[in-house]
Image (cartoon, helix red, strand yellow):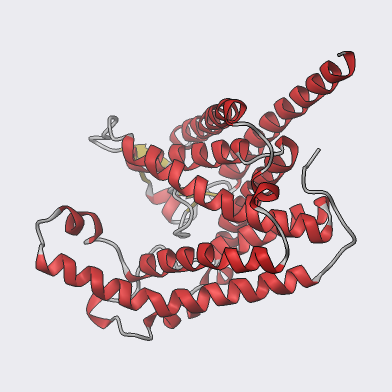
Amino acid sequence: MCVMQPVKADYRALMSLVIFITGVLVVGALLAPPLFFVTQSVIQSDPEGALASLLAKKEFPSYFNRAAMLAAFVGLVPLLRSLRLSWAAIIGDVTARAGWKQLLCGILFAITGILVMALVCLETQACRMKPEPGWSAWALPVISGLTVATLEEILFRGAILGILCHSLGTRRGLWWTTGLFALVHFLKPPVDGAIAASEVTWSSGFWVITQLFRGFSAWNNFVGEFLLLAVVGWALAEARVKSNGLWWSIGLHAGWVMGMKYFGQIVKTTPALRDGDLAPWMVRNTCKSIVSPIVGVVPVLAVLLTAVAALWLLRVRSAEKAIASTTK
């Protein structure tokens, strides 16, 4: 059972979240240009340095993403205080000893699902292996997966889900969180920067905000990307609720990011995929927040089947614990 007990529905929490998200976008738009200018100055002063090699290819929308994430975590403190929620209620009551096992199980389940998806994509010629795949380049996907999963699970399945479950009840909180997760990620800047570094100004952050809704203009993008994000959001929220902690959701999230990012490094998409010949089963990804080169019905099914298997295991283990506690 979820540790976040439902109370009488209080829709003021939704208004608080709308204000919070609006504030995050505005602060992100204000912070992105100075972050970009400072970084460009550092790169120009030491073009051969490690920082320059790491950030030289980053386009301006990436700075908006980082600035918005920073604003979100800073803004969480007053948000939680205003709603009188503690971090203990947000994180859950799973011990670290049990949590590491859940984390590893989640990663294994997710990577297995991505492996099945990859085999289908290769078999259908949606993508082909690169001439030099770089099989050993696994460190960046692992680090990226764990970092992104931890930060986003604390924010979405920790704070936002906690707020909504506390205010609206568990079921409604779960579905609202799923929708917000999909919407926020779908509204992220597109995969192409669409603005030259020399053209970035102090108001460019607000230009990025105007570009966030472009994904809704393409039917294939909506089916392939938004629905994938919604299924991911639902699975992670269900894992948080059923496990009473963030470990399972962090593991699943990290495994999906690791698997998709690694898959994207070793393959290249085919003309058939890019021309839309395989839609809606497989479509070229244009959403910056999805690291897989391929979206569509096949990735959605891969994530959904993985989630169903993981949630079934969670249900079985919960039943076993309940039986064990009653026999003591």
Seen in the image, is 227 located left or right of residue 83? left
Residue 33 in percent (x, y) is at: 33, 78
Query: What residue is at 18 percent from the left and 72 percent from the top?
Result: 41
Regarding residue 161, the answer to whether it shows in the image is: yes
Seen in the image, is 152 located left or right of residue 171? left
Seen in the image, is 7 located left or right of residue 135? right
Viewer-closest of 320 and 124: 320
Query: What residue is at 49 percent from the left and 80 percent from the top?
Result: 210
The quadrant in which the N terminus is found is top right
From what the image shows, is residue 319 above or below residue 9? above
Viewer-closest of 81 and 114: 81
From what the image shows, is residue 107 above or below residue 53? above
Number of numbered discs present? 0
Q: Quadrant of residue 96?
A: top right
Residue 138 in percent (x, y) is at: 33, 34
Instruction: Single out the residue that lies furthest toward the top.
Output: 327
